[in-house]
Every structure is written in C-alpha cells, then in structure tokens.
Amino acid sequence: MKSSERRDRIRDLLEHSDQPVSASAIAEKFHVSRQIIVGDIALLRAADVQIFATPRGYMMKPEEKPSGKDYMIACRHRQDQIAQELYAVVDNGGQVLDVIVEHAVYGQISGQLQLSSRYDVDSFVRKLEEGNSAPLSQLTEGIHLHTIRCPDDSCFQRILAQLRQSGILFHKP
C-alpha cells in the first residue's frame, strides 16, 4: 500500500470511530511502525485534517454542536491529587476537555484530555505513572486551568463546591 493510500485509510478510520484510536493500534492495523503512523498523522494535520491527540489516542474533531456549556476553572494541587481533582468533575456529571498552563517562555500550553468517566481518569493517571511523565501543572507549581463541559449550571456548581471543599480550586489568598 502506498503511503498516501494509508493516510486516506487512517483518515477514514478516525472519521468513523467514536472513540480515540491509539497510534499503536493504527500501526498494527496497517502493519507499519508506530512512528510511521505519527508521521502520517503529522502530514494529515499539515493538510488541514482536523485530528487531535488525547491521552488515549487520535480523534477527529467533532463537528456537532456540544451539549452543555463550557466553563473555565483554575486549580492548584499536588501531583498526588490529580485523580481527586478529575473525579470531582466526572463524578458530578462534567467532562474535562483540556488542561492549560501559562509558561514564561512558550506562553499558553494546553493538552487535550477529553475525560468523562472514572475509567478515563484512571487511564490518564496510569499513563502519567507508567510513562514516567510529569503533568503540565508541574511547570507552574501546580497552578493550571481546565475547560470543563457541564450539561447545566447545577452540575458546574456541584463541581465547584467539591473542588473548593478539597482545597483544589485555586484562589488568591
């Protein structure tokens, strides 16, 4: 198979998947290395194909209108409180869309999360631990933002209350 044909098939695979697909799974499907797939994804993005990476794999950007409202929250916590913070959102009916930090040199740095269940949170935390990776918030002494999506304002208020109670919601003293 030619590389251009493989990229067309990768695009088709992602367009028809409602879940993220890992580079390793795509590589196995097309009998190439993971690094070849990472390169293919980069070329597709350069051709303006709207693909984004989540901790669980690649997805096409959804074109439908999201249900609910997006809110921005500021948090600060230790690394051992990551799961507690994310559980507070998903257990109360919200979805964690991303994490954002403000870097002195690079400016705003964000990572797509797309977490909507405890399973998603556990997978994310496991990847951080197994990959020996540091969360973005480590760059900013634990201070970071999240975009969260909530179906209604009462969901958002429950999340705020739980984060405030656990001391994770950031506020200036």
Image (cartoon, rainbow, N blue to C red):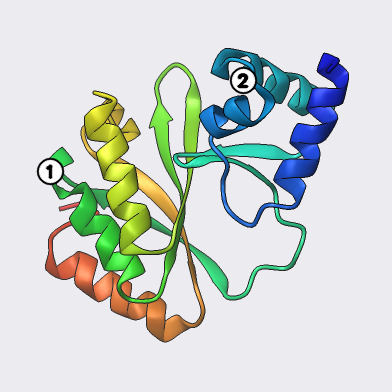
- Give how far apart the Cα atoms at labels 2 and 1 are: 31 Å
| Image quadrant where residue 5 sits | top right
x and y percentages locating residue 84 in the rendered image: 19, 57
Q: Which quadrant does the N terminus fall into?
A: top right
Q: Which residue is label 2 attached to?
A: 38
Mark closest to the chain's N terminus, 2 or 1? 2
Task: Name the foreground residue: 98 vs 35.
Answer: 35
Q: Where is residue 152 in the image (x, y as percent from the top left)?
A: 49, 82
Residue drawn at the location 85% of the way across and 31% of the way down: 8
Left or right position of 89 against 9: left
What is the secondary structure assignment of the residue under circle 2? Answer: helix
Which kind of residue does numbered mark 2 sit on? Val
Q: What residue type is labelled 1?
A: Asp
Measured along the vertical axis of the image, is residue 154 above or below residue 124?
Answer: below
Residue found 48% across the figure and 31% down from its top: 109
59 displayed left or right of 169: right
The residue that label 1 is drawn on is 80
The mark lying in front, picked from 2 and 1, is 2
Residue in front for this viewpoint, 137 or 64: 64
Locate residue 159: give its quadrant.
bottom left
How many marks the image carries: the answer is 2
Whether residue 17 is visible to the viewer of this picture, yes or no, is: yes
At 39% from the left and 76% from the top, the residue drawn is: 93
Q: Which of these two is toward me, 137 or 49?
A: 49
In the drawing, does residue 165 fall left or right of residue 45?
left
How many residues crowd mark 2 within 10 Å: few (<14), some (14–19), many (20+)? some
